[in-house]
Amino acid sequence: MKITFILLALLFVGCGSNNPKYADNNNTEGVVIDPKTKLMWQDNLDAEENTLNWYDSIKYCNHLNLSNFQDWELPSRDILVTSYKSKEIFAFTSYSLYWSSSSYESNSSDAWSVLFDYGYAYSYIKTDLHYVRCVRGIR
């Protein structure tokens, strides 16, 4: 019985090693690296709990100092939609709207947000409050 439990525990731990949920975090707190895109994402409680308007979202990312990195930015609509496809890598996520840096082409008062329930992009007035997740490229 004891050996069976140990073998099952080892099997369970071993199966998780290829799971993208355990994406490389480069041994830093509050971030995760998407192994598919090689982008580093903010992954802390702020990404799950804080809502800002679009203007403050851009400022927040531009001034973010996280895990000794200061070159964060608000992701574009396309990058944010791509991140939805790898959403299982994030430990902290609200399945709601996240701002992108992309303004809505037909109305400069609006910008694109991505709904993390389904990965769809929608335009909203920039003064609305949505969640924010910052991103940076890996050099």
Image: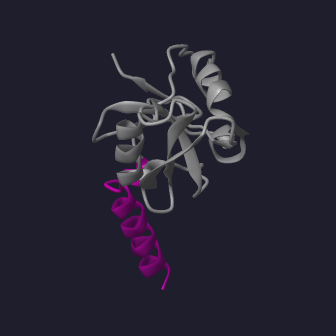
Residue in front for this viewpoint, 111 or 79 = 111
Count of numbered marks = 0
x, y (%) of residue 104?
Answer: 46, 36
Image-quadrant location for residue 62: top right
x, y (%) of residue 33?
Answer: 41, 35
Residue at figure coordinates x 44%, y 55% from the top left: 88
x, y (%) of residue 63?
Answer: 63, 15
Residue in front for this viewpoint, 72 or 106 = 106
Residue 44 in sight here: yes
In the rendered structure, the answer to whether residue 124 lies left or right of residue 41 reads right
Residue 2: within the magenta? yes
Instruction: Point out the image quarter for the C terminus.
Output: top left
Residue in front for this viewpoint, 89 or 19 = 89
- When the figure is inspected, residue 137 is found, relative to residue 39, above or below; the finding is above
Residue at figure coordinates x 57%, y 58% from the top left: 95
- When the figure is inspected, residue 29 is found, relative to residue 82, above or below; the finding is above
The stretch of residues the image draws in magenta is 1-22
Residue 66 in sight here: no
x, y (%) of residue 97?
Answer: 57, 50
Q: Main secondary structure of the magenta part?
A: helix
In the rendered structure, the answer to whether residue 108 lies left or right of residue 92 reads left
Q: Residue furthest bottom?
A: 1
Residue in front for this viewpoint, 129 or 14 = 129
Residue at figure coordinates x 65%, y 23% from the top left: 60
Residue at figure coordinates x 47%, y 78% from the top left: 5
Residue 94: within the magenta? no
Q: How is the image coloured?
A: one colour
- When the figure is inspected, residue 53 is found, relative to residue 83, above or below; the finding is above
Q: Residue furthest front?
A: 106
Q: Residue furthest left?
A: 36
